[in-house]
Image (spheres, coloured by chain):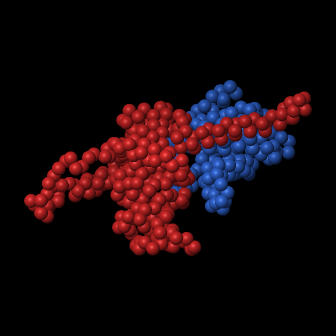
Chain colours: A blue, B red
């Protein structure tokens, strides 16, 4: 059990490097940028204290901000994501609750559950991020289009990463 | 008082959220301020170091394009040399160096980080205050204006790209001297717009837009964009001009920082004049 906590710093390092060195340079059609680093917050165990979850999200966002010169933007959006997460977890809880061994993954709770959970949280994060970036409502539909298209690609990258994790865990 | 404490403890989670958001927005606004002190961006030692290491590897991938651009620039400069001109009136040319005085000094620099997909884009250069770069200096590339230096550390400089919502540079038509302002509208990174050119000016598609040299930041006459399409604005005296940048902002490597030797003198004079009016 203790050993499993050592995996989080490694995940953090790998995801941040992947995000700033590779994914930030991939832009489909010039403006769609997948933000895979969110999966680090999505993967946090259910029993993580809310305070800790929010602090970790803030630091994750801040790290991404430092590398992409967008001070505070990713930090604020990630904190919003962490704020929403407990509500989403509660709404989608199975009838007899989560088991102690459950973690938020396809492996433990199924594709349907994970898809709902990830889609809603990614959408919350992207709405917050893009509207903070533009900081006005005059180009509402344009911004909303960018939110939806980016959220779609983020979700796809998250699903790919999730399937890699499922494979690794089932082999273990 | 007891009720207040009860209220706060009941919604402690929400207040914690607010606290984090306030802090995040605080650093967001602190950093948005054009001259604001900012140390947590990609000019600091850790992130800047990582980026320059990474760019050392990836630079090999665009060596071909960079060589091509440099060769073209060499050709152009070669053509401007005095030795490639023939004097029309052999006897009357007098070369007197005291007529010309050096005004702009160009410092060669390299891009270590760049973006084009955000609404407010920045670049990081591998020259800093040790090389004499200061905030407010202009940055140009082989194909025109790139941006203005925003912050400098000892070895790196953060540049506010032309692809930034608050970037605005003074330009004019190459054919006539009508001047306007060039900026980016946040859409496609290849196109920008020029405002304030009056309707009575004769325009053609393909006309070159050059820097006006009115600000102390850029020298006059650097070709930056060409006119793609233009329409007169209804009920206004000006054109709505869409221009295509000559620079491909996705493919930047070798750039020049422009140092204007007389900048302080010009700005001191302009400030003095404005203060006298206030």
| Residue B149 appears in the picture as rendered | no
Q: Which quarter of the figure is the C terminus of chain A placed in?
A: top right
Q: Residue furthest right?
A: B3
Q: Position of residue B73 (x, y in %)?
A: 29, 54
State whether residue A75 is above or below residue A34.
Answer: above
Q: Observer-nearest residue: A121 or B117?
A: B117
Q: Which residue corresponds to the image point at 58% horizontal and 50% vertical from the top-left?
A: A34
Q: Position of residue B164 (x, y in %)?
A: 52, 52
Q: Position of residue A42 (x, y in %)?
A: 68, 42
Q: Which residue corresponds to the image point at 28% horizontal and 56% vertical from the top-left?
A: B72
Q: Which residue corresponds to the image point at 14% horizontal and 54% vertical from the top-left?
A: B94
Q: Residue furthest front?
A: B276
Q: Residue furthest left?
A: B91
Q: Observer-nearest residue: A126 or B243?
A: B243
Q: Which residue corresponds to the image point at 90% horizontal and 29% vertical from the top-left?
A: B2
Q: Position of residue A67 (x, y in %)?
A: 53, 40
Q: Is residue A67 left or right of residue A107?
A: left
Q: Which quarter of the figure is the N terminus of chain A placed in?
A: top right
């Amino acid at each position: 059990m203790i050993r499993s906590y050592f995996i989080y710093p490694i995940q953090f390092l790998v995801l941040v490097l992947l995000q700033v060195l590779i994914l930030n340079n991939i832009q489909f059609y010039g403006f769609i940028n997948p933000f895979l680093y969110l999966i680090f917050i999505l993967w946090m165990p259910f029993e993580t204290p809310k305070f800790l979850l929010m602090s970790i999200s803030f630091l994750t966002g801040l790290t991404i901000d430092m590398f992409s010169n967008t001070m505070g933007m990713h930090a604020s959006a990630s904190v919003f994501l962490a704020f929403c997460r407990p509500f989403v977890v509660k709404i989608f809880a199975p009838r007899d609750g989560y088991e102690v061994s459950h973690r938020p993954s396809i492996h433990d709770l199924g594709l349907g559950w994970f898809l709902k959970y990830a889609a809603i949280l990614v959408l919350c994060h992207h709405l917050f991020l893009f509207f903070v970036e533009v900081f006005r409502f005059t180009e509402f539909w344009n911004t909303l289009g960018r939110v939806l298209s980016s959220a779609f690609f983020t979700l796809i990258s998250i699903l790919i990463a999730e399937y890699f994790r499922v494979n690794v865990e089932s082999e273990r | 008082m007891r009720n207040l404490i009860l209220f706060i403890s009941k919604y402690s989670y929400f207040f914690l959220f607010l606290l984090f958001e306030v802090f995040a927005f605080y650093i967001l606004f602190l950093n948005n301020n054009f001259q604001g002190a900012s140390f947590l961006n990609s000019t600091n030692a850790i992130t800047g170091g990582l980026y320059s290491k990474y760019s050392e590897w990836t630079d090999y991938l665009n060596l071909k394009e960079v060589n091509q651009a440099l060769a073209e620039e060499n050709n152009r400069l070669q053509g401007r040399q005095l030795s490639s001109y023939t004097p029309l009136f052999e006897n009357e040319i007098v070369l007197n160096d005291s007529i010309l005085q050096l005004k702009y000094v160009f410092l060669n620099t390299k891009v270590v980080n760049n973006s084009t997909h955000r609404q407010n884009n920045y670049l990081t250069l591998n020259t800093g205050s040790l090389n004499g770069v200061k905030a407010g200096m202009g940055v140009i590339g082989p194909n025109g204006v790139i941006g203005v230096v925003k912050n400098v550390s000892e070895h790196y400089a953060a540049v506010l790209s032309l692809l930034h919502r608050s970037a605005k540079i003074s330009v004019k038509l190459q054919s006539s001297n009508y001047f306007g302002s060039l900026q980016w509208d946040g859409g496609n990174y290849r196109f920008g717009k020029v405002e304030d050119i009056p309707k009575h000016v004769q325009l053609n598609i393909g006309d070159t837009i050059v820097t006006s040299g009115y600000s102390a930041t850029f020298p006059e006459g650097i070709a930056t964009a060409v006119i793609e399409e233009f329409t007169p604005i209804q009920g206004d005296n000006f054109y709505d001009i869409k221009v295509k940048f000559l620079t491909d902002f996705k493919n930047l490597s070798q750039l020049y920082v422009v140092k204007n030797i007389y900048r302080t003198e010009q700005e001191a004079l302009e400030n003095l004049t404005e203060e006298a009016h206030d």
